[in-house]
Amino acid sequence: MSEQQQVMAIYGVGAMGGAILDALVSDRGEGDPEVRVVEPRAEQADELGRRAGVRALPAAAAASEADVHIITVKPYDVPTLLESVRDSLRPGSVVLSLALGVTLAELTAALPDGVSAIRGMPSTPARVGQGMTVLSPGDGVSDEQVAAVRELLAPTGRTVVLPESQQDVATAMSGSAPAYFYLVVEALVDAGVAGGLPRATAADLAVQAALGASTMMRETGEEPVLLRAQVTSPGGSTAAALRELEAGGIRETFARAVEACARRSAGS
């Protein structure tokens, strides 16, 4: 499918669907005819038309026009949605499901012949173009289709292709991970306030530290342990702070958190 022919349909405009839509509209400009949204609530559909400038269509109508279908509804709604659009899906199109825990086998069983499936896990920073979406293509998905999906998702941030067997750990490391960092920043802000800083100042300092540290890691490509060492003078104040974090079991706590998240993602 050529770039000119690609039409994307987004089914469900909740938190994640809205984040993807916002990134796409921000990048492409309002009224882009290549984006369709499926929103059954009339008031919400009208609002999307006014705010995002995209066409809101019934599910079957959107399915009949789209080359790439992005499913962002709740996992328990996926079977009903796919049943409602099954007869409208065009051969050669691809369904990208972002519904947690819905497997490629389940998707494939619900799709007609000639329509392929990709399982994905996004992250909410997609809204500001800094998300990460983990993609696991199913059987029959061509390299061209994977490349097309990655290109369509480019305004939301980065993508990586992994086997489905690694999706649950990737969920813990990417999809849920923004919440871990929000919690760290929240804790830092509270500590700064306890130390006498105004909350707005403490928040500004903590957020900039998080942004600066992540940018350093991304742009330098250096290992976190080396960057940490550059900030940590022997016997200094940073070393004292890190000693307290290690004594509190920060590494073990993160390991347990990732494990617990991966287990829940796998349904156990």
Image: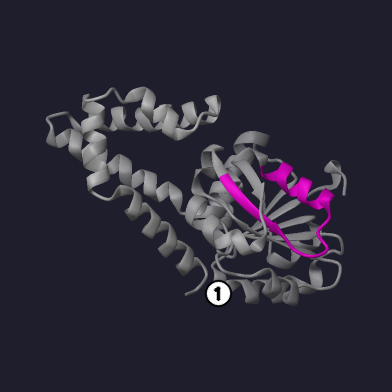
The residue under the point 84% across, 49% down is: 144
- Secondary structure beneath dot 1 equals helix
Relative to 189, is 262 on the left or the right?
Answer: right
Q: How is the image coloured?
A: one colour
Q: Is residue 151 magenta?
A: yes
In the image, is residue 195 above or below residue 184?
above
In the image, is residue 53 above or below residue 145?
above
Give 252 or 267, whichever is nearer the viewer: 252
Relative to 252, is 268 on the left or the right?
Answer: right
- Examine the rendering and report whether any part of residue 50 can be seen: no
Q: Amino acid at mark 1?
A: Tyr
| Count of numbered marks | 1
The residue under the point 86% across, 60% down is: 92
State the image coordinates of residue 231 (x, y, percent, origin top left): 34, 24
- Examine the rendering and report whether any part of residue 250 can be seen: yes
Q: Which residue is mark 1?
A: 76
The residue under the point 21% across, 32% down is: 240
Q: Quadrant of residue 71?
A: bottom right
State the image coordinates of residue 261 (x, y, percent, origin top left): 44, 62
In the image, is residue 66 above or below residue 151?
below
Pick out the residue farthest to the front.
234
Look at the image and give the residue range highlighted in magenta. Answer: 132-153
Q: Quadrant of residue 159?
A: top right
Give 218 or 24, whichever is nearer the viewer: 218
Within 10 Å of the Cα at label 1, are there few (<14), some (14-19), or many (20+) other Cα atoms? few
Q: Is residue 165 magenta?
A: no
In the image, is residue 233 above or below residue 9?
above
State the image coordinates of residue 214 (x, y, percent, origin top left): 46, 32
